[in-house]
Image (cartoon, rainbow, N blue to C red):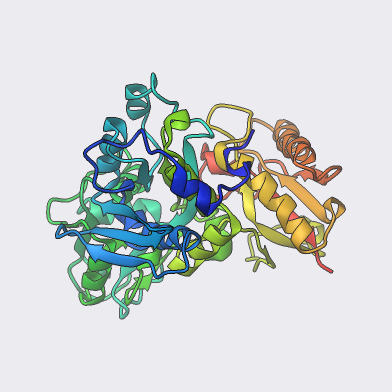
Amino acid sequence: MLGSLRKPLSPRHILLISLTWLSPASAFDLEIHGSNTVGATLAPMLVTGHLQQMSEREVRSRATGQENEQVLSVRANGKSVSVLVAAHGSSTGFRTLASGQAGVWASSRPVRPGEADQVRQQADLTALESEHVIAIDGLAILVHPSNRINQLSIDTIGQIFAGKIGNWSQLGGENLPINLYARDDRSGTWDTFKSLVLGKTFQLDDSARRYESNDQLSDDVSNDPGGIGFSGLASVRGSKLLAVSDGNAPALSPNQLTVASEDYPLSRRLYLYTMGERTPEHARALIEFSLGAEGQALVAESGFISQNPIAVKPRFDDSVPESFRRLTQNYERLTVNFRFAEGRTKLDNKAQRDLLRIKHFLDQHERSSSDLLLIGFADTQSNELRAQMISELRALSVRRALAQAGAANVAYTGYGHFMPIGGSGDQRNGRVEVWIKIR
């Protein structure tokens, strides 16, 4: 049973619930702790939208006196309902969730195995009822607007932030020293950058300036002609955004399609985590709202990428084979990819919810499942026949899952290990794209 498919709780029901999992000392009805990327703008918008469903009165916001914290409250049925949003980094959110202080952990990275093990007796944080993908973000590589560099490879970015490339002239730019701007160690944005860019090959140079805030980092880069930094996509502001390439795949700029489909090599998921069956009903209702169509519309408004599918006609570059152009010439691509849990053949938690999003898209636009085409892809294999078989099996797996969600008999095919979006061995290469006929 999908956690996001239960009948939504009514505002009256929400007001009557008992929040037994919260710390008795809490002055708030719900506490959300964690990522600055999520907590700076997105989480307050989602909380505000959720509280507005409970009352016709204005939702009020006040500071706590602590930086990157705010309290959102509304008066409903004679009772004040208040929610604290504290955005001090993804790791802080896990600690407060595990202690029972927070009802929701906001994170810009997936839960770590060690963290999941710490609370496994209370809840499985990797399960569908605990792990909730609320938005897709692109890790933005930022430079000054005057910088004439337009794209970089992940390896080159790693060398820059490790201090191995120290002047823009080495990359075809101006003769200017490179100044580094990075998020702090408590940040999920830093964890993502460290994992996707630095890896085990590079270490961040000691000269890098560190920030708790995405917005402040971006503002400082936009004022430094020699600067380069990284932030969440919603914090590009006045900086220039670079396209990024991975391995032999073409460079991609983060946009609605490349980020929503997670084709962009520095795309990432933004999460809300809860404690499974121990989740307070107020937190559960907020999750339901956030994953639904109204919540996802607020995700788009906040500057992140919504998971509500839309149809897009991609712009193909010269690397796209003619056979693929013919295959998709009468189709548009939906902004969703189906991916599989690492090391498994079953769909991951996001994909489980995307099944119903596609069914809702079809119903909303009065389309049928016969309008869809699933195209499976495989990572590099020892021979083309094996790759073709794997890609078709992946597409068939999604076809069966869609049938269970109410969209039966969807057409499918495999495209082998051609058109990779990452380097060899990148899990993102093994995907299933969703296309829909042009009317």
The reply, left or right, for residue 261 in relation to residue 323 is: left
Displayed quadrant of residue 437: bottom right
Q: Nearer the viewer, residue 397 or 386?
A: 397
Q: Nearer the viewer, residue 170 or 16?
A: 16
Q: Position of residue 23 (x, y in %)?
A: 27, 36
Q: Position of residue 105 (x, y in %)?
A: 35, 42
Q: Is residue 191 above or below residue 64?
A: above
Residue ranking furthest to the top: 121
Question: Residue at 27% of width from left, 38% of height from top?
Answer: 101
The reply, left or right, for residue 361 in relation to residue 217 is: right
Q: Is any part of residue 335 visible from this angle?
A: yes
The reply, left or right, for residue 290 in relation to residue 340 is: left
The reply, left or right, for residue 204 in relation to residue 330 is: left
Q: Position of residue 174 (x, y in %)?
A: 26, 76
Q: Is any part of residue 254 visible from this angle?
A: no
Question: Residue at 48% of width from left, 59% of height from top?
Answer: 54
Of the 4 image quadrants, the one containing the N terminus is top right
Image label count: 0
Q: Is residue 375 above or below residue 117?
A: below
Q: Is residue 101 above or below residue 262?
A: above
Of the 4 image quadrants, the one containing the C terminus is bottom right
Question: Residue at 69% of width from left, 32% of height from top?
Answer: 383
Q: Is residue 129 above or below residue 308?
A: above
Residue ranking furthest to the bottom: 146
Q: Position of residue 318 (x, y in %)?
A: 64, 65
Q: Nearer the viewer, residue 144 or 288?
A: 288
